[in-house]
Image (tube, helix red, strand yellow):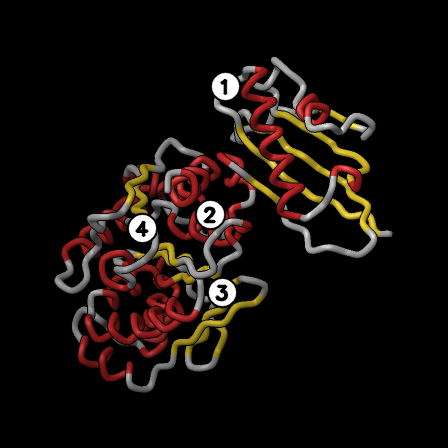
Amino acid sequence: MYIQAIRGAITVDRDLPDEIFFKTKQLLSEIIQKNGISVGQIISIVFTATNDIKSAYPAKAARDLGMKSIPLICCQEMEVIDSLPKCIRVLMHVEVPEKIKIYHVYKEGAILLRPDLVRPEKLTIAIDGPAGAGKSTIAKMVAKRLDLLYLDTGAMYRAIGLKMINKGINMQHHREEVISELNTTNIDVSYDNGQQIVFLDGNDVTNLIRTPQVSRYASDVAVIPEVRLKLVEIQRNIADKNSVVIDGRDIGTFVIPNADKKFFLTASLEERAKRRWRELNNNGYDIKLEDIILDIKNRDECDSRRTFAPLKMADDAILIDTTDKSINQVINEILNHIFVDS
């Protein structure tokens, strides 16, 4: 005999006994049905509820389903910042003669706890926005929550910028030299445990492309159509073959206009500058906040005014202002739009 564990969760709209019992029975019934087990094979169930559920014990629903002699444990969860409200979780232990394929069940708003279990086989998510809006941080964490690849398009432009720095090319006055260098420039990405590694001409430059100087050069090369076309081809090939989360300036409007879901993140200029200042200081760069404000303002103008694929929110994108929101709040808002509101 084998003992296996099955997890599940569901949310309720109101803290009322009838709704708590109905939703819990719905969850338990689906766990039993999807896993092809019988009530007699269940040896114990642990129930937990967030601390905003106080009117009834969810475990009573198991008794109503005929689980009279099964040990049931019911606990209230600790209060955690940004935790999913009005949520009931289940941990069911079963004893079966042979190992079975386990299907964990997450329903209603609880989908946000394990969106990777319910996502489609192929899913492309585009996240656009100006510098410092939190695109990369949010995109990486959304990709992790969904078990998708994360494609940092900005890193590719930074790699091109790094090459021009190494070549001593001033892009403001020698654009034709940049275009000429593209013919002998190879940009590639690979993934190590889900982390993107960027290669420039065969060399790993992942840790060399995050300096303020490279950031400025990246914006300069991004306005050159030949550069964008070269990198967009690489990006589209990756998105065609994989489920990905992609962030940048023109993902939803130009790079992947047919993305399954599109988001546009923004924040106030001051907030974006503070975020970038903290990031650079944590990485050992001594730079004034005023200089970063000016740099981001210039980058915004450069990105928005370029004639080829400018920074622009797609007509079908969802706008999210991240100024006064935590990272978890933004992630949950995105996941809510993808799974709960769909």
Q: Earlier in the sequence, mark 2 or mark 4?
A: 4
Residue 196: give its label: 3
At horizontal 37% and vertical 54% (from top left) the residue drawn is 125
Q: Residues within 10 Å of mark 3 (few under 14, many from 20)?
A: some
Name the side, left or right, on which 160 lies relative to 13: left
Q: Earlier in the sequence, mark 1 or mark 3?
A: 1
Q: Amino acid at mark 2?
A: Asn
Residue 153: name its quadrant: bottom left
Marks 1/3: CA–CA distance: 42 Å
Marks 4/3: CA–CA distance: 21 Å
Q: Earlier in the sequence, mark 4 or mark 3?
A: 3
The C terminus sits in image quarter = top left
Residue 262: give its label: 4
Residue 334: name its quadrant: top left
Q: Secondary structure at mark 1?
A: loop
Q: Secondary structure at mark 4?
A: strand
Q: Amino acid at mark 4?
A: Lys
- Counting from the top left corner in percent of width and height, residue 211 is at 40, 60
Marks 1/4: CA–CA distance: 31 Å
- Counting from the top left corner in percent of width and height, residue 272 is at 34, 42
In the rendered image, which residue does mark 2 sit on? 281
